[in-house]
Amino acid sequence: MTLLGDVAAAGDVVARDETGRAAALGAGGKHRARRADGAASRARILEAAGKLFADQGYDAVSTRALAKAARVNLSAIGYHFGGKAGLYQEVLRQLIVDSEPIMGPAAEGLRMGVAGARGDKAKLAEVMAGFIRHLLGAVLRDDRMRWPMALMLREFNQPSPWFPMLLEQRIHPLHNAVAGLVGAATGRRPDDAETRLLTAVLIGQCMVLGAARRVVWARLGWDAYTPERVEFIVRTLTPAVLAMFGLPAIDPDAQGGKP
Amino acid sequence: MTLLGDVAAAGDVVARDETGRAAALGAGGKHRARRADGAASRARILEAAGKLFADQGYDAVSTRALAKAARVNLSAIGYHFGGKAGLYQEVLRQLIVDSEPIMGPAAEGLRMGVAGARGDKAKLAEVMAGFIRHLLGAVLRDDRMRWPMALMLREFNQPSPWFPMLLEQRIHPLHNAVAGLVGAATGRRPDDAETRLLTAVLIGQCMVLGAARRVVWARLGWDAYTPERVEFIVRTLTPAVLAMFGLPAIDPDAQGGKP
DNA sequence: TTAAATAGATCAAACGTTCGATCTAATCAA
DNA sequence: TTGATTAGATCGAACGTTTGATCTATTTAA
């Protein structure tokens, strides 16, 4: 039994959310909740699966542990997602959807900030500082982005068959937006190889603090990221990154969140 | 079962080290080599296990796949290492031992370079450039360090019971040496929290190019790291990192390897 | 012979998946 | 308002396979 074959078969597992079902059953959708509300079970499975997959990896998570964590019957996984592989794919799809409200405005704000700066290095520095604070907060502090980030990092050095989807819909848009900032700061075109590389390094050096958190903690004598420690990281890293891209230093106390 | 397809045929396990057996037999040592030379089998298992664990992770690798890749019988794993977990521990231990000839002199050279610079920013810039070239080469190009780096990255965000050993014997010595350079460049004490953090970021931003190589490749239209592309990365990253730590730019053509 | 090392067989446990039975809520004919 | 019907959802119990570990027998060099 090769997984790839099953994957191909499970590839057309569509979202079975309520709206889809209601639409399929008729325009005048009246009924909502069934017995124990299948949509709720589905959501619980997705939630538990995201955390477990992110924490332990695909192989290390058994369907039984999954069912137990989501407080559903074992067969519910097969019923709702077609199997373990289908569930993983849906977790990734949902990750992209859920991170849109956080990442989308951030990328848009980045583009607006760069356009508004019109080459003014001081203003670009503000935009850069805001982005670093935003990204570090998302990676290290924001609990909503904790396991999604961990799961993405797993995809990075062990891509699943759905890594291209993640790349297309989450990585490229974010990198393109940041490349606009990096290009403006260094005076290069946003789609230069150098700009793209430095963009990857910039984003990567923020995410590595999340990926290799055990190392960071061990080096600094920490046992967890607290808001105060994240703030320390932001204040330490921001001047270094600004200097890295030839941007002027800014007043630390003026560092606000993203506009 | 894994989501990944057949990764890296696993058939390219290096031919058995004949010198090892010959030396054991001829050196007048007591009884070392028996029937088919147990030391050679042990070494083959270690080699294959390192690559497989690094590529697929501990759980995704079965003892049968290990035995097949190492061209030994299944029971040889239990005989030589006591079991799968014992094998993994030994792989980690061997990783530390094998990386010593590469990492040890690098750390020592770093200390010597920093001491020799005596605060001269231009000389510190040379040392920093040499270190970046060295580390990037080890992470991205050196085939001997390919799977060890991948395995270490796995330990970083999913520590095994032997992570403390790795931390103690490999991470801390390297970071301490680099912290000396970073401290000298930024004018801080080497054991400052800021210095330690920036040190982790510096090392991390080099390693992330190896960890998230698929992303880097996708952004730059690459499909592998070639020596030319690694050189491009070194030349692009070096000036940025020098600026990051307030060191003067250096002549790119003068960038040599580590002294 | 003696002990190291390999080969092959076998073990219980855990794996992902599948199945039919069961239950609930909406639907429809009366 | 009924009672029967249907589809959605859950459940327990298996399925066949693979896992890591273990066992005995055999082979080989000392």
Image (cartoon, coloured by chain):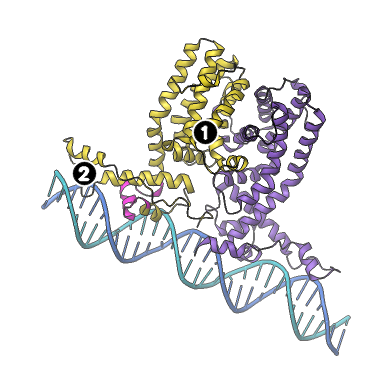
Chain colours: A purple, B yellow, C blue, D cyan
| Apparent side of residue D15 relative to residue A150 in the rendered image (left or right) | left
Provide the residue designation for mark 2. B33
Q: In which quarter of the image is the C terminus of chain B?
A: top left
Name the one closer to the observer, B54 or A231.
B54
Question: Given the image, what chain letter belongs to the residue carrying mark 1?
Answer: B
Image coords of residue C4 (percent x, y): 23, 46
Give the chain letter at badge 2: B
Instruction: Identify the residue shown where x is 70% and y is 39%.
Output: A176
Res. B46 image quadrant: top left
Instruction: Identify the amino acid type marked 2.
Output: Ala
Query: Label 2's element?
Result: loop
* Mark 1–mark 2 distance (CA, rounded to whole Å): 42 Å
- Span shown in magenta: B69-86
Residue positioned 74% across, 25% down in the render: A125
Mark 1 Cα shell of 10 Å, populated few (<14), some (14-19), many (≥20): some
Identify the residue position indicated by label 1 in the image. B230
Q: Nearer the viewer, residue A148 or A68?
A: A148
- The numbered mark, 1 or 2, whose residue comes first in the sequence reads 2
- Within the magenta stretch, is there residue B74? yes
Q: Residue A68's quadrant in the figure? A: bottom right
Measuring 21% from the left and 50% from the top, which residue is drawn there? Answer: B35
Query: With B232 as the anchor, is A48 left or right in this view?
Result: right
